[in-house]
Amino acid sequence: MLRSRDRGRGYGWSGPLAVFLALSVLTPMAEARMDGSPDAPGRMIDIGTHRLHLLCEGEGSPTVVIDSGLGALAFEWRSVQRTLASQFTTCIYDRAGYGWSEPGPQPRTTARITDELALLLERAEIAGPYVLVGHSFGGYTAQLFARRFPERTAGLVLVDASHPEQVQRYLESPLRMNTAPARKSGRIVYSGVTVHDGLPEEVRAAVYAVGFTPKARLAMTQEYLWFRDSAAEVAAAGPPPDRPLVVLTRGKDTAEQSGVESAARRGLFELIWLQLQHELASTVPRAAHIVAEHSGHQMHLDQPELVVDAIGMVADFARAENAAVRVETAPANGWLSFRHARWQVDRLHASHLLDRSPTPPGGGSMADAVTQPGATVRARHYIGSDRPQFQVVVYPEDPL
């Protein structure tokens, strides 16, 4: 768990940071267990001020670019990347200070991170436009990149991603929970180790080798202390471009393990998160909001096949509507099943308009909106058509 204290007065944050705030800390920073760092599996790209680690695989467009959560190694996404690489060029990278990447200049805010990503892709000669995938804190990067570089953006997938108003909303009544430092002079105390059961052995070895280093701890601390500034940068960037968007939200209650005291407050914690996620899906005309019923915050490890489906669907829309990403050999037609997924909103498919909007806390009906009988909607997408907006089928139960 994490704790943070500002100099002069304390904030007792245990688990809420690790789960809610885009703190995608898969393995909270414990003492390093290293026999020597292995060679970087990808390329080290010089962007002028420092070098960043980039690993790309596969062929085909649009190119998929994945940004990890706060404190996370990009290699966590290895299984998702390998599955996607059969159809698309797919790139994962370590932000400055993480994994094999070198530390970068300060401050470590999303604006700087986004500019570094744009330069990384340019220096590495990775052609766009891109489907941007942002998990947790990495969702800020995807959102800001799309706003700053709309011509290089083909679509977005936000995976339990941060909302630019989340710190403010959790501070408000009735929850009144402080979830990010208000000062840059705080200190972070790291304790405890929790390794996700879904980590393949290859990934687990990489996490132990390069995920627990002082360099990685410092990178996480810097991003966390500047978290509010990153949120403000996204909020000030204006509306996003009209691109296909899928918002994936966790379906499992993570508030209890994050240290929220009572059942009532835990319920409110999750309902506020669901509302924030719904708002992310409301930022563009063409979007879907899907709840991953078997996932906590680490959705790329809990339900990787669902994340792959969401990325494939967004890429399908991007390919069909953008001549820049069309290819002679399209992915083979087939179903994306979206197993164990509840569709809250669907404004991507003309034949399946759905909007089950949760209302904010205090409105008295959010819980009803997400638990009422018959509220569960399941659908699967048929990929590879030149008219993807019509390629959806609703079904009552999970397909075989």
Image (cartoon, helix red, strand yellow):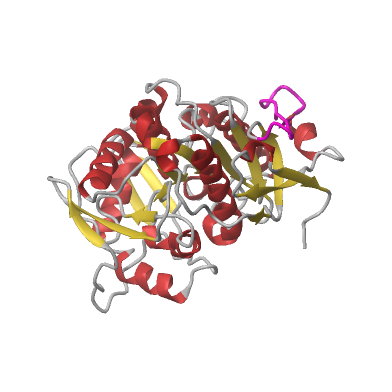
* 80 w.r.t. 201: above or below: above
Q: Which secondary structure dominates the residues rendered in magenta?
A: loop
The one of 188 and 385 positioned closer to us in this rendering: 385
Residue 237 at x, y = what percent? 37, 23
Q: Which residue occupies 41% across, 44% down?
A: 138
Q: Give the farthest residue toward the right.
A: 373
Q: State the count of labels.
A: 0
Residue 294 at x, y = what percent? 67, 56
Residue 69 in magenta?
A: no
Q: Quadrant of residue 224?
A: top left
Residue 33 at x, y = what percent? 32, 74
Q: Is residue 156 left or right of residue 399?
A: left
Q: Is residue 73 visible?
A: no
Q: Which residue occupies 24% across, 44% down?
A: 122
The one of 353 and 365 positioned closer to us in this rendering: 353
Q: Quadrant of residue 274?
A: top right
Quarter of the image where the C terminus is located = bottom right
Residue 6 at x, y = what percent? 33, 38
Residue 356 in magenta?
A: yes
* 368 w.r.t. 125: above or below: above
